[in-house]
Image: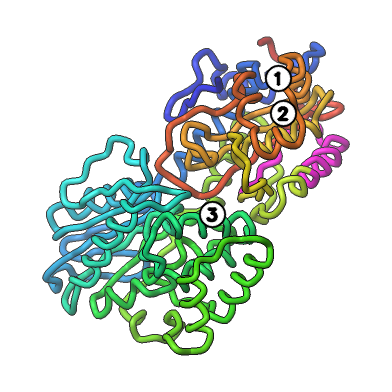
Amino acid sequence: MFRDVTGERGAGLPDPVVVPLAEVLVGLCAEANPLSVHHPAVKGVFEGAREAALAAVDPGNAVKNHVRLEDEVLHVGGREYDLSRYEHVYVGGIGKASVQMAKALEDILGDGITEGVVNTSYGSTRGIELSRIKINEVAHQAPDQAGVDGSKEILDLAKKAGEGDLFLFVVSGGGSDTFLSPVEPDVNVYAKFIKDLKGIIGDIKKVNCVRKHVDVVKGGQLAREISPADSATLILSDVKDDPLSIIASGPTVPDESSFTEAKAIIDEMEAKGGFVPASIREHIEKGARAEIPDTPKEGDPIFGRNQNVLVGNNRMALDAAKQNLEGNGFGVELIPEPVSGDVNEFANTLTQKADALSQTITKPTVILAGGEVTVAVNKDSTGAGGRGSTLALCMAQRMEGRSDRAFMTFGTDGVDFYAGHGGAMVDGNTILEIQDLGMPLDDRVVYGDSYPPLDRLGVSILCEPTGTNVMDVYMMVVMPKRPAQLQPSSI
């Protein structure tokens, strides 16, 4: 399998200062060797850029870049908090990177923290222990009772904060699933509803619009509980374009959506065969009739003493990968717009861009992009796969027979739907290799059971959760038809 080398150099790979990896690839192609993701040099390209991207969005570093303590004054974003004025400092946190972010706050504030609680996903603590802040490990993707119970602890802490207190809140990807207090009392029923909502509706803005209106901690409603304390929320974004009201369903951010919009979405969902519990429909319909208050909006005084600070996002990861690749002699074509939408549409776009580039470039070039594709999966599917592994197979199909391209996708959280799988890398020979193994490769496999063939080939990225989450990163190496500037190097 593709070994996770986060934090280390690949053994035996050329030093990029002495022999840039771009030159090594030119040497390979000059000897009529196809680009192969099994070759150490090709792996080295991907490993080095992945390592650089992950280091740039390390949650602890992200917090420390935006929070510092000077004497008794805590600087957060553009504001200053004189700690001598506060009776208590509380810390709350949600999402897959919340433990690392909370650890950074402990490093800065130490015993200045009165108490705290964070909810993170199972397996995301990375061995970190906190002295002032309690850690709750809860479910991600399918919310569980541990998530509900842990969320009550965070909510109780927020209610405890009052005038003369400071509440610091850290938010990261997975926050919507790890922080919840739904109107549906049975968490298993709620989890099935959320699964159908994601699968049928897909669009994260629509999904989170509904979540905000069936869950009393989302859509700015946590800010209502924190008020009148001073507060600052530190946000690590896992959403395209970084809309603060959408990330983790915006628990401390004014909500722009409404019950009326939420009703239209569940109507659409139900019309398409989705499951909508009676408790949820009743609650949304009451809201649409203005029988219960909507989520708090811009201008509500509860937000007057809170600030929301974006501390990390996908673009930071891309910029770091770009710098690493350029340092290894590659040209880089960065797609600036975050990727979203159907997996096949993006695969087609990427292929067309590679086709055009190959006609004009004179040195090895990497197309670099970030975001999250969507995959239409049969809701009854029992296969094992994620959006990254599906995209990898889609790209392998489009590169089939080509010797001048290789592709990698990885989730910055190290979790491509299932823990243990972080993505995959493929080349123009991948499809033939799968066929040689005698494995099927029909639509059922590509779109619902994509792990097994990639695992058998040893091209899956097998890793532990990284502790961060800023969506996915995509890299495609494209070799020039006529290399000009670089001379082949011995390999």
Q: In which quarter of the image is the N terminus?
A: top right
Measured as percent of width and height from the top left, residue 262 is found at: 56, 74
User: Which residue position is annotated with label 1?
Assistant: 36
State whether residue 79 appears in this view: yes
Relative to 22, does residue 305 appear above or below in the rendering?
below
User: Which residue is label 2 attached to?
Assistant: 406
The residue at the point 68 percent across, 62 percent down is 272
Disc 2 from disc 3: Cα separation: 33 Å
Q: Give whichever of 74, 295 is nearer the camera.
A: 295
**Label pair 1/2, CB-CB below 8 angstroms:** yes
Choose mark 1 or mark 3, whichever is in front.
3
In the displayed image of the protein, which residue is found farthest to the front? 278
**Residue located 48% across and 23% down the image:** 9
User: Within the magenta stretch, is there residue 359?
Assistant: yes
Give the residues in magenta. 348-370
**Helix, strand or loop status at disc 1:** loop
Q: Classify the position of the C terminus by image quarter.
A: top right
Residue 75 vs residue 489: left or right? left
Q: Residue at x 47, y 47 (%)?
A: 469
Residue annotated with mark 3: 195
Instruction: Give the amino acid at mark 1.
Output: Ser
Alpha-carbon span between mark 1 and mark 3: 37 Å
State left or right for residue 481 relative to residue 21. right
* Among numbered discs 2 and 3, the one appearing first in the sequence: 3
- Cβ atoms at labels 1 and 3 below 8 Å apart: no
The picture places residue 281, in percent across and down from the top left corner, at: 52, 73
